[in-house]
Amino acid sequence: MEIQWTLLIFSLFVSLGMGSFAIVAITELRGIMPGIRLPGAITSLAALGIGSAASYFHLGHPEKIFHILGNIRSGIAQELIVTSIASAVIFVYTVLLWKDSAPDVRRKLALVGLILSPVVPFATGRIYVLAARPAWDTWLLPLMYVASAAVLGAFTMYLWIMLREPDQKTLATVNKAALLGQVAFTVTIAAYLIYVAMAPHPHSSRSVARLLTGDLALLFWGAVVLIGQLGPLFLTWRNMQGPPTSLQAGVPVSPASGGISGAVAATAENRLILAIMGLLCALVGSTAIRMIVYLIGSSVQSYIY
Amino acid sequence: MTRKIMIVDLDRCIGCHSCAVACKQENGISLGVFYNKVRTVGPFGNYPDLELYYLPVICQHCNKPECVNVCPTAASYKRQDGIVLVDHNKCIGCQYCIMACPYGVRTYDKAKGVIEKCTLCAHRVEVNEVPACVSICPGKARIFGDLDDPNSEVSKAVREAGSFLHRFADVGNEPGVGYILKSRKWRS
C-alpha cells in the first residue's frame, strides 16, 4: 500500500509526545529534574497537536468527526479516545505546572499520563493489526510503535536536559533510558521482521527479501538499520564513555585523554550536537520503519485498486 | 432470513466488460472509480496449451465483513439481506475500511471525501430488480438471488456447482460472492 503520510506523521508525533511525557511524569513523581518538566510537557503537547492536525487532514469529512463514537470497537475510535484523554491530561498538567500550583493534582495527572504513555502509541499501532494485510497482522507491530515512542521520548528529553539541566547524573539517567528504549526498538523490529518472513499468504510485495536485497534495501539498511538503530546505539554508548566533567567546567577535554570518546564527546557543545544527532537518528529510524510498514502492507488479494 | 448474493459463472463470461460499463452508468460513479472490474487471469501454460479466464470482481458482501467491524462511525453496515453498504452521511473518509478489506474493492472518492463500493444495486433490489451488471450480461454469467431460498436460481447454481464453486481467500471474513469455474483451473 502507498505510504499514508498524514497517518505516519500522526503516529510519529503522537509517539514522540507520549514518550516525552513519560519522562516528564517520572521526574514529577520522583521529584527530580524540575527544570525540564515544563519544556518537556509543552513539547509533548505540541507533538500531540501536530499529530492530531495531520490526522485531521487525512479525513475526507473532518467536520463529521463526532460520528467516530458510532462504533467504539473500532481501532480508530479507541485511538481517538485515548489520544484525546492523554491530550487533556497533559494539557491540564502543563497549565498547573505553568502556574506552579496544585502539586498533588499534578502528581496524579503525571501518574495517569505515565500509564497512558505506552497505551496511546500501542493504540496507534493496533489499528494496523488486520487479517487482510498479512504483514500487519501481528501484535508485534503495536509493540514496535511503543518502543519507538520510548526512543523518541528519551532522545527528545535528553536534548532538553542538555539545554536546561546538563548535569552528569540526569544525563546519565536519561541516556540509559534512551539506550534501553533503543534496544527494545531494535529487538521489536527484528521480531516483527521475523514475523513478516513467516506470515501467511506469502507474496513478493511483502517479503523480507524486498527489504534485505530488493527495492527497499536502501531504506531498510540505510535509514532503519544504520541511522535508526546503529546511530542511536552508538551515540548512547558514546555518551556513557567517561565523566563529562567539562559540562560543569566548560573546558574541552584533550582528545588524547579519551581516545575517540574524548574527541567526540568531551565538550558540552559536542554533547549538544550528539543530543541533536540522537534525536534526528531516532526520528529517521521511526519514520523509515513506518514507511516500510506501509510499503509491505499489501492485501491478501487486491483486485480493483 | 434472506441472504442476497451473486454467483458468477466464469465458464460463461466472455470478458466483454459490459458489466463494468453498466455499473458505472447505473450508479453514476466518478471518473477513475470502479465498483466492478473485469480482470484477465492468465494466460497460463505453454503454446498451444494455453488457458485464461475472465474474473469480474466486485465487493464480496462478506458474511463477516471486516470493513464493517473497523468502521469507526458505523457508516459501513450490513443489511438484514446481507448487502454491505456505506452510509455517506456518516462516512468521514478515514479509509480504514480500505485497509481492512482483503480484496481491494473499496475506493476513496477524493471529490466526495467518502468511500465508494459496489452496492449490489440495492436501489434496484428494493424494487425487485436485479443489479445492473446482472441484467446487462450477454453471456448470462451472473446470477443474483436469495441464497436462503432453496428454490432460487442462485441456490440451484451453488448446489449444481459443487466443488467447482470457488471463492477468494478467506481470512475470517467469509466472502459471499461465488465463482463457478469448471473448464479451467481456478487460480485466483
Image (cartoon, grey):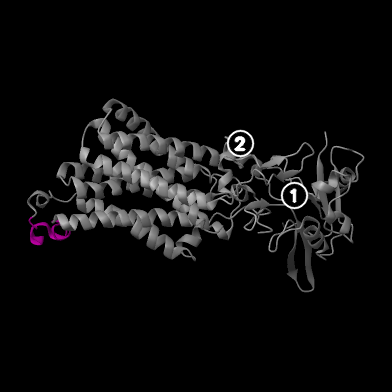
Chain bearing tag 2 is: A
- Can residue A190 be seen here? no
**Quadrant of the drawing holding the N terminus of chain A:** bottom right
Residue A112's image quarter?
top left
Chain bearing mark 1? B
Under mark 1, the amino acid is Arg
- Tag on residue B44? none
Q: Position of residue B5 (x, y in %)?
A: 81, 45
Position of residue B137 relative to residue A19, above or below, is below
Magenta region: which residues? A251-266
- Are the residues under marks 1 and 2 on the same chain? no
Query: Looking at the picture, how far across and down is residue A216, in whole percent?
Result: 47, 63
Q: Hey, which residue is sitting farthest top in the picture?
A: A104
In the orientation shown, which residue stands out farthest toward the front? A99
**Residue A70 has which mark?**
2
The 10 Å Cα crowd at callout 2, few under 14, some 14 to 19, many 20 or more, is some
Decide which of B81, B5 is in the foreground and name it.
Answer: B81
The residue depicted at 78 percent of the width and 65 percent of the height is B52
Residue B2 lies in the magenta-colored region: no
The answer to whether one can see residue A285 in this image is: yes
Q: Which residue is drawn at 13% across and 59% down?
A: A259
Circle 2 — which element?
helix
